[in-house]
Image: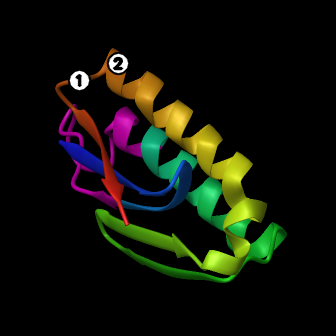
Amino acid sequence: MIKAELFVKGKKIVGFHLTGHAGMDEYGKDVLCAFVSSAAYMTANTITDIICAGAQASDDDGDMYLMISDKDADKCSDILSGFRLHLVNTEEQYPKYLKVIFTEV
């Protein structure tokens, strides 16, 4: 199962931590893993390389972390809200393979 932890400060998403694999298919052929990973990379790359926000980021097989600096949270609000919506909608379709958790920070 993929665990998608979204970090919330007030009403804003300020980061995320993805862990695990969906397990719908064998490693390298799992469409849900690819789907979630692609959305996470697009979100992280937009924040770090397009918006140029200050962020802590790490990526290791099956583990991705991103935390936005407080000063750049407003600039990243829309992209992170879109990522949240994407994950929540996907969780509704695949509840056995994806769990979205909200953590106040």
State whether residue 46 appears in this view. no
How many badges with numbers are in the image? 2
Q: Are marks 1 and 2 in contact (CB under 8 Å)?
A: yes
Asked if residue 45 is positioned above or below residue 30 in the image, the reply reads: below
CA distance separating discs 1 and 2: 6 Å
Task: Tell me the amino acid under the disc marked 2.
Answer: Glu
Asked where in the image residue 2 lies, by quadrant, the reply is top left
Is residue 45 toward the left or the right of residue 29 in the image? right
Q: For residue 75: magenta?
A: no
Segment colored magenta: 18-34
The picture places residue 71, in percent across and down from the top left corner, at: 70, 79
Task: Tell me the amino acid under the disc marked 1.
Answer: Pro
Asked where in the image residue 52 lies, by quadrant, the reply is bottom right
The picture places residue 90, in percent across and down from the top left corner, at: 42, 26
Q: Residues within 10 Å of mark 1 (few under 14, many from 20)?
A: some
Q: Residues within 10 Å of mark 2 (few under 14, many from 20)?
A: few
Picture quarter with the N terminus? top left
Asked if residue 62 is positioned above or below residue 72 in the image, the reply reads: above
**Residue at mark 1:** 95
Q: What residue is rendered at 35% in x and 16% in y?
A: 93
Towards the viewer: 73 or 2: 73
Q: Residue furthest top?
A: 93
**Residue at mark 2:** 92
SS under mark 2:
helix
Q: Residue furthest front?
A: 10
The picture places residue 78, in percent across and down from the top left corner, at: 72, 47
